[in-house]
């Protein structure tokens, strides 16, 4: 016969999972199939998947971004970064060199927050700010080193030869 403590340790988790269902287990996990298409409610006019007046277009799972457009001026210098959520693009951008700009999902792997980001250049990591609705967890800009809940997914990018157009393939 089992003692009370052993019995509760074995039975309680089963009862809790049956009561709460699988959503209890997934409450703090992230969805790996993020919707990365333009968001019309994100602050930019992205109707029909394009927003040339905001400096970008979206077609066939590819963003084409005009880096000369004022909306993307933060990316003109190495170390510049931006959260493009306000333009309706659910991505973070980081200029790592004169010839390279990285793109990451802006959905926090831990809580799904999209608007609470800062970048800590001295540590090469993004931070999901608690003061903005996040939790202060940090995520490496290498797209490989996990933070709380996983890594920031990075996407294939390319710059045009003249450096004026960024292409992001989702």
Image (cartoon, rainbow, N blue to C red):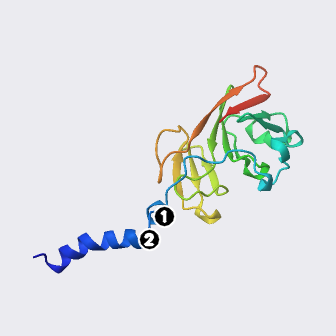
Q: Position of residue 21 (x, y in %)?
A: 44, 67
Mark 1: which secondary structure? helix
Q: Position of residue 134 (x, y in %)?
A: 59, 61
**Labelled pair 1, 2 in contact (Cβ < 8 Å):** yes
Q: Nearer the viewer, residue 161 or 38?
A: 38
Position of the N terminus, as image quadrant, is: bottom left
Left or right for 103, reference 88: left
Q: Nearer the viewer, residue 85 or 162?
A: 85
Q: Residue at x 50, y 63 (%)?
A: 27
Position of the C terminus, as image quadrant, is: top right
| 15 versus 161 height, above or below | below
Q: Residues within 10 Å of mark 1 (few under 14, many from 20)?
A: few
Left or right for 71, reference 133: right
| 159 versus 144 height, above or below | above
The label shown at residue 5 is: none
* Residue identified by numbered label 2: 20
Mark 2: which secondary structure? helix
* Residue identified by numbered label 1: 23
Query: How many numbered marks appear?
Result: 2
Q: Residue at x 84, y 44 (%)?
A: 48
Q: Position of residue 103 (x, y in %)?
A: 65, 38
Q: Residues within 10 Å of mark 2 (few under 14, many from 20)?
A: few
| 40 versus 165 height, above or below | below
Left or right for 45, reference 76: right
Left or right for 67, reference 133: right
Compute the Cα span from label 1 to label 2. 7 Å
Q: Residue furthest left?
A: 1
Q: Residue furthest front?
A: 18
Q: Residue furthest right?
A: 53
Q: Residue furthest bottom?
A: 4
Q: Residue at x 61, y 35 (%)?
A: 155
Q: Position of residue 25 (x, y in %)?
A: 43, 62
């Amino acid at each position: 016969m089992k003692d009370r403590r052993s019995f509760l340790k074995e039975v309680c988790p089963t009862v809790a999972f049956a009561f709460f269902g699988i959503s209890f287990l997934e409450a703090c996990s992230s969805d790996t199939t993020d919707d990365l298409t333009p968001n019309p409610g994100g602050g930019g006019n992205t109707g029909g998947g394009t927003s040339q007046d905001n400096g970008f277009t979206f077609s066939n799972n590819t963003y084409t971004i005009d880096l000369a457009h004022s909306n993307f001026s933060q990316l003109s210098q190495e170390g510049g970064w931006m959260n493009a959520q306000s333009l309706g693009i659910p991505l973070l951008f980081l200029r790592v060199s004169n010839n390279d700009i990285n793109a990451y999902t802006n959905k926090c792997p831990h809580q799904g927050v999209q608007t609470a980001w800062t970048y800590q250049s001295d540590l090469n990591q993004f931070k999901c700010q608690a003061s903005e609705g996040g939790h202060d967890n940090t995520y490496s800009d290498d797209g490989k080193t996990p933070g709380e809940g996983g890594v920031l997914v990075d996407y294939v990018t390319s710059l045009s030869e003249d450096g004026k157009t960024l292409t992001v393939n989702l």
